[in-house]
Image (spheres, rainbow, N blue to C red):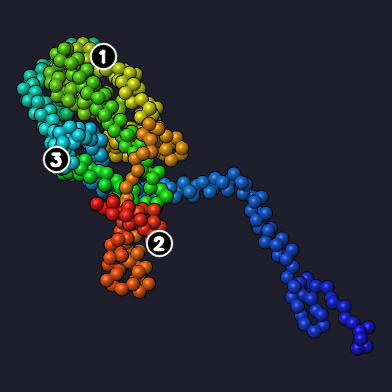
Amino acid sequence: MSDSGRPAQQPSSPDASGTVDDGAHAVRVTSTTLASSTAARPRDAESSVVTHSVQAAASWAWRFLAIAAALAVVFSLVAYLKVVIIPVAVALLLTVLLQPVSSFLRRRARFSPALAAATSVILLVAGIVLLVVVAGRSIVSGISDLSDQAVQGFQKALTWLADGPLHIDNEALNGYLDSGLAALEENSSALLSGALSVTTTVGQVLAGAVIALFCTLFFLMDGRRIWSWLVGLLPRSARERTHQAGRRGLVTLASYARTQILVAFIDSVGIGIGAAIIGVPLALPLGVLVFIGSFIPFVGAIVTGSMAVLVALVALGPWQALIMLGVVLLVQQIEGNVLQPWLMGHAVSLHPVAVLLVVTAGTLTAGIVGALFAVPIVAVLNTVFLYFHGHDKFPELGFDDHVDVRPSGRRSVMVMSAENMLSAGVPATTRTTTATETVTTTETTSGPASAPDLSKGDRDDH
């Protein structure tokens, strides 16, 4: 009984829908326990069907697809801009090779940076022209003898096919020759289009050579300023580590380039001298060809050396060709087992299997250019990634060299200070002087300069 004399109504229990009727109002009560359990049921069901390993694999899969898509975009962009990117890459290699010459001219001959860079590039061009002229004269003088020897060797081969163990009659040989000439005539249009494409490629090579020489000139003159500008685009916290990693990557690139030139020179001298001793025609041009091909590690010297074996086979016969093959294999053994491990050292710490796979992947991706640049790119990336993960391959470099990004930092501080003074209502005559003085604020300023060290800035400017 209630105080008013009416019987007290007991609150009824909630019905199936979760509604409680107290006689005056219908209050809908939502059970937290029921809701949470209902929401948890699909998750439990999903967990029972999809295991944790499958969920982890799915997470890795979509991340891998995102990375693959990003790499595809990068490769497409590189392929589209290859006319510019390849000369810049060549210019980087030439820069690390010519940097000692330019530094020597600056220190000893007291050349200006521009004059030292120009002199280094001129010496490079003069050396290439001299090599081409000497090799060209050798080709012109020896091509007639080689053609005569090739005809004689061809006749000997026909005689051996007819009178040797194969016993191929002359009619069959003539039929093979006629079919070969007919196929050549049928594919003359394809050969003509290929010649036109070669002409286009030669034009692109010449244009790329000009771009590479100009980039090399400016890299030698203002390489430090260009690098400082690039590092200055990064966040402040990443600039110093990126600069130190870049220094080590540059040392790796320089070590690779200089070592590869020395190895290529030894390969070309060994195979060229062997060809000259055996009496192979065009020994000097073959040596130059081996020198160029040796820039592709392990593979280039073998391919170009096989051309020397082919010339020996055509001009001299099978026994001299076998001797030439032995010379090529001997030079390759010396390169792979002595020169590469001893000269490369820890600068390019890539296993020979890794080098072979990288060269193959580069060849499949970008042809000869990919084969040339695959190993140095991977070597530099290996050094940089190891440094970012705490392993310094060149601790002797130290950390005394710091990147200088003050010009970009000063401009940003000047703009910020001018905006702050405008908002503070500083008179125009005062704003001009103060904004000019705040240009001297150092890189560590992260906002409006509260108390810039003007004396230090004056010392830097003067």
Q: For numbered disc 1, what is the local secondary structure? A: helix
Number of marks in the rendered image = 3
Amino acid type shown at disc 2: Ser
**Element type at mark 3:** helix
Which is more toward the observer, 185 or 238? Answer: 238
Q: Label for residue 38?
A: none
Q: Amino acid at mark 3?
A: Leu
What residue is pinned by disc 2? Answer: 450
Q: CA distance from mark 3 to mark 2?
A: 44 Å
Name the quadrant containing residue 417. Answer: bottom left
Q: Position of residue 131 (x, y in %)?
A: 12, 28
Image coords of residue 184 (percent x, y) = 15, 33
**Side (left or right) of 248 relative to 122:** right
| Kind of residue sitting beneath label 1 | Gly
- Separation of disc 1 and disc 3 at Cα? 47 Å
Residue visible at 17% across and 34% down?
105
Category of crowding for the residue at label 1, using alpha-carbon neighbours closer than 10 angstroms: few (below 14), some (14–19), many (at least 20): some
Q: Nearer the viewer, mark 3 or mark 2?
A: 2
The image shows residue 358 at horizontal and vertical percentages of 36, 33
Front of the two marks 1 and 3: 3
How far across and how far down the image is residue 260, in percent? 27, 28
Crowd band around label 2 with a 10 angstrom C-alpha radius: few (<14), some (14–19), many (20+): few
Q: Are marks 3 and 2 in contact (CB under 8 Å)?
A: no
Above or below, 209 relative to 312: below
Question: What residue do we see at 35% from left, 74% from top?
Answer: 425
Disc 2/disc 1 C-alpha distance (Å): 76 Å
Quarter holding the N terminus is: bottom right
Residue 115 is tagged as 3
